[in-house]
Image (spheres, rainbow, N blue to C red):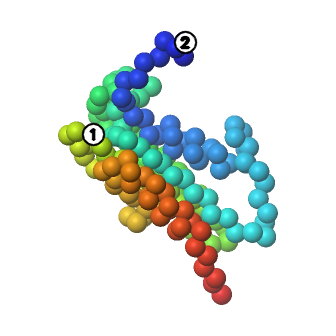
């Protein structure tokens, strides 16, 4: 079955976002390790996409070339809302930080993804790239922001 699969060029970002979120859960299917209650963690999801949402498991929503009726983006927005709604009881802030990266190398270029902008925790966490070479710099920027410590009193 796998060898019979053929690439269509379609993109389904919600699947990547859902699996990214699952990897941070301490429950099935990924079973992340238990966290030390004396330590403050940063839970980050980085969603990188090379295109707009055009593919879906329901062909009526997208055929790999285009999205119909906005259903894929709507499902992704609902997923992002659910992720952002998980609050830390100590701080009242969202547990998760979401970075989104659109690598727009298509000719002609795709439109800027409004759903990737929407899903990013804030505007500074959405990156629009026009060259694959920018991916390394962008991931270095994200890594630096995640590693910056702030001591608060």
Return the x and y of residue 8 as percentages of the image width and height. Answer: 37, 24
Say which element carries label 1: loop
Quarter of the view holding residue 94? bottom right
Res 36 seen here: yes
State the mark number for residue 1. 2
* In-front residue for pair 72/35: 35
Return the x and y of residue 3 as percentages of the image width and height. Answer: 52, 14
* In-front residue for pair 123/140: 140
Q: Residue furthest left?
A: 108
Question: Residue at left 44%, top 59%?
Answer: 137
Question: Residue at left 45%, top 47%?
Answer: 48
Decide: is 46 above or below 5.
below
Q: Residue furthest bottom?
A: 153
Residue that mark 1 sits on: 106
State the mark number for residue 13. none
Nearer to us: label 2 or label 1:
1
Q: Quadrant of the C terminus?
A: bottom right
């Amino acid at each position: 079955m796998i060898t019979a699969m053929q690439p269509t060029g379609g993109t389904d970002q919600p699947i990547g976002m859902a699996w990214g979120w699952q990897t941070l859960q301490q429950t099935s299917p990924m079973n992340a390790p238990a966290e030390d209650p004396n330590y403050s963690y940063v839970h980050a999801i980085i969603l990188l996409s090379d295109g707009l949402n055009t593919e879906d498991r329901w062909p009526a929503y997208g055929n790999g070339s285009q999205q119909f009726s906005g259903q894929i983006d709507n499902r992704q927005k609902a997923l992002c809302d659910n992720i952002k709604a998980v609050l830390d009881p100590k701080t009242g802030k969202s547990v998760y930080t979401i970075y989104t990266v659109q690598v727009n190398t298509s000719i002609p270029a795709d439109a800027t993804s409004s759903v990737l902008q929407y899903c990013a925790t804030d505007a500074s966490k959405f990156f629009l790239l026009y060259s694959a070479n920018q991916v390394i710099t962008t991931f270095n920027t994200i890594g630096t922001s995640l590693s910056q410590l702030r001591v608060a009193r």
